[in-house]
Amino acid sequence: MNPPTVTRASCASCPCVNRRRPDTLVIVAALLLTLTSLATPAGPKFDQALHPRTWSFPRDHGRHDGFKTEWWYLTGNLRERATGRRFGYQLTFFRSAFVTHPTTTRPSPWAMTDLYFAHAALSDVKGKQFLHTDRLARARDHYALASDHALDVTLKDWSITPTTDNAFHLVSADPRFALDLTAAPGRGPILQGPGGLNPKGTHPGQASYYYSMPRMPTTGTITLDGRTFTVEGLSWMDHEFSSNALADNQSGWDWLALTLTDGTDLMIYRIRDKTNQTDYLSGTRIDPTGSVTYLRPDQIQLASSQPWKSPTSGAAYPQRWQLKVEGQPALSIQTRLDNQELQTPNSTDVTYYEGTVAVTNEQGAPIGEGYLEMTGYARSLTTP
């Protein structure tokens, strides 16, 4: 789930600007102007998600000019083949537009047309460590760009690119950890709402176009502290684009993507108001046959407990969740590591939580796994 802001954990200010290199200052200044859309609707020049749309793949895996914000979000639970050692990973690319159609309105190759951001994170469950990194660049051919006809996005030496067998190759590298993974077709694309229109509130246009690809068989390698692990497991991909943002009374969201052993997949999200109460609640259930049900708020019960307080940000993130979906046995969701908090000083300078979770039934038996995202706990996303 990704409400339409620059990132799922988007920022409205960047207090660390003075620590950045001089060649980055112009990008950061432009970013701050762009992010004023966080708490207000976008201007009329940008398209908005107002009605169900007709989709065409693989074209719609690509970039959508005309919309202000777009992202490609992959998370997954993987295991080392030899030992079963568990890892969770996240690799996300974001695009924030300054103009609707850069090829026609900004002819200079140095013009500010789009900004690209990327976040990468690794949860090493056995080692009880969480590593993350982020980056930013303005759009430039062969350096920071997304294709407009396929899922082919690059930011420096990080990328998600298509393969000849309709899979996606994921690459990111950092001195501490690296991902080199291939995610093959699984389920989907699954439209998250009729025609892919996914509301984030009750106001017209307060929505995104959103689809997911759950259960993507994933293989490859993870490099951690100089050691390479051969891994396999499942990934979940989200792709979203929009031009509108959170309402003024909304502060952040909680998002769950769950893959259950009985063949059911669940995407659940709630958007919280500034009193930390549920402002909007929605979700999608995909049953073992692939049938899709769009869930109403009265069909979802979601409760959190067991807060963990970050020693760096001071934010308190719930580590345990109880979920009851109509027609589905009750689920308990538990984070596999407490500290899965990202801080992103090299891109959005926002603090949020994104990490691997285990799913059990009411008797405590393991019945699935997934990913949990929580934003707006360190600071409301609509605070100026």
Image (spheres, rainbow, N blue to C red):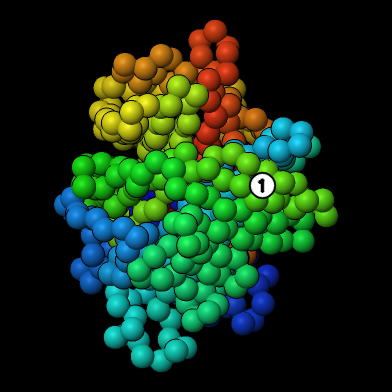
Quarter of image, res 326: top left
Residue 62 located left or right of residue 74: left
Local SS, label 1: strand
Q: In the rendering, at what x and y percent does residue 229 appear?
A: 75, 46
Residue 223 % position (x, y): 75, 53
Q: Residue at x 16, y 52 (%)?
A: 51
Seen from this angle, which residue lies furthest front?
165
What residue is shown with label 1? 122
At label 1, the amino acid type is Leu
The answer to which image quadrant residue 101 occupies is: bottom left
Q: Position of residue 55 (x, y in %)?
A: 24, 55
Front residue (pair 382, 363): 363
Q: What residue appears at the point 72 percent right and 61 percent down from the top-left corner?
A: 174
Quadrant of the image containing the N terminus:
top left
Image quadrant occupied by the C terminus: bottom left
| Identity of the residue drawn at 33% across and 43% down | 190
Crowd class of label 1 (few under 14; some 14 to 19; many from 20; radius 10 Å): many
Q: Residue at x 55, y 70 (%)?
A: 155
For the residue pair 149 and 296, the one nearer the viewer reads as 149
Q: Residue 311's image quarter? A: top right
> Please, which residue is most extreme toward the bottom here?
108
Q: Can residue 41 be seen in this view?
A: no
Q: Is residue 190 visible?
A: yes
In the image, residue 155 sits, relative to residue 380, either above or below, namely below
Q: Is residue 259 above or below residue 198?
A: above
Is residue 334 rendered to the left or right of residue 255? right
